[in-house]
Image (tube, rainbow, N blue to C red):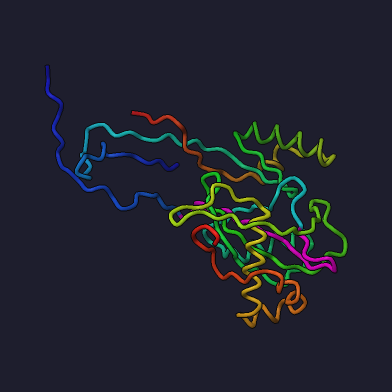
Amino acid sequence: MPRDPEPVVEIVPALTNVAWSSQIVSQSLEALFVYLAPDGAHHLRPIHATTLRVGWPADQQPGDIVLAAARRYDLVPLLVHSTSWRLEGGRVVLTYVVAVEPPGELNENLADEPVARAELARGDAMGPPPEIGAAQVLEHAFRHLAWLVKDDAAVRDALPAWATFLDGYEPEPFRAFGAPG
Amino acid sequence: MLGSGYFGAVTGTGRATVRPQARVREVLMLKEVTCLCGWVARGTDDEVVEELTRHAWEDHGVRKTREEILANAVPIDVPGDAPRS
């Protein structure tokens, strides 16, 4: 009976072994198109999805992709800003909120929904929330904008009509770790 | 096509040993098409064409050709479940 061959060498496992290619669509971008109406903020979502997802080619700026998507639906962007990220279905989803002018005629592929308040999805100190819904992503996006509109002159100038509405949101520059309280 | 391989198992000391046989994870090359309405189809060329043809007609009342559909499809890498030796 021949003996199993002995290992030739012993190596320490690599810190990372993820392949990289300039051709890989590395991430998914999520665009939240929102506009301000007299009764509050509205979300313009694709009629057959909870949010719009687009691929992120490695050679393009994500903000440019999101802006191009907004124009594809005949929307007029006022501001685009990334507000959160999460892991979903094996992909990193980077969320952008896109404040737009109130649409004149709504694109047939979009549904207009008022934005309702939601409890934030919270994880623990070492992990993400078990589930994150679109309403929670929107809630966090508005908290993020509530902070930016006070802290960033460019955002304040881009969204002069939004300041009063955003006063109703707790300003939150970053996601909080840990349970509330 | 990309794949990932292993060099044996991590030992109790936290080191890896190089074995003659390496396992290679299978990677399936599929296509994905996202409609302007947000609807997504994922599968082989034939599967996405079939699904999107049906979706376009039933949900939007339009006919799409195979060429139109595949022109909007992007390749995606999906790791297979079973490792090969």
Name the residue furthest front.
A181
Q: State the residue lying farthest toward the top.
A: A1
Residue A139 location, quadrant: bottom right
Image quarter of the N terminus of chain B: top left
Q: Front-most of B44 and A145?
A: A145
Q: Considering depth in this image, is A109 or A84 the residue closer to the camera?
A: A84
Looking at the picture, tell me which residue is in the foreground, A72 or B8: B8
Quarter of the rendering containing residue B19: top left
User: Residue shown at 66%/64% (left/top)?
Assistant: A97
Q: Is residue B49 left or right of residue B13?
A: right
Q: Residue at x 45, y 32 (%)?
A: B81
Dominant SS type (magenta): strand
- Name the quadrant of the C terminus of chain B: top left
Q: Residue at x 75, y 59 (%)?
A: A115
Relative vertical location of residue A167 with respect to residue A110 in this rendering, above or below? below
Count the marks. 0
Percent position of residue B14, x then y: 22, 45
The reply to whether the magenta stretch includes residue A153 is no
Name which quarter of the figure residue B25 lies in. top left
- What percent of the width, then of the height, locates residue A10? 17, 43
Query: How far across and down, in percent of the image, does residue B40 sit?
Result: 67, 42
**Apparent side of residue A44 relative to residue A82 in the rendered image (left or right):** right
Q: Which residues are magenta?
A: A22-43
Q: Is residue A34 left or right of residue A126?
A: right
Residue B39 percent location from the top left of the image = 71, 43
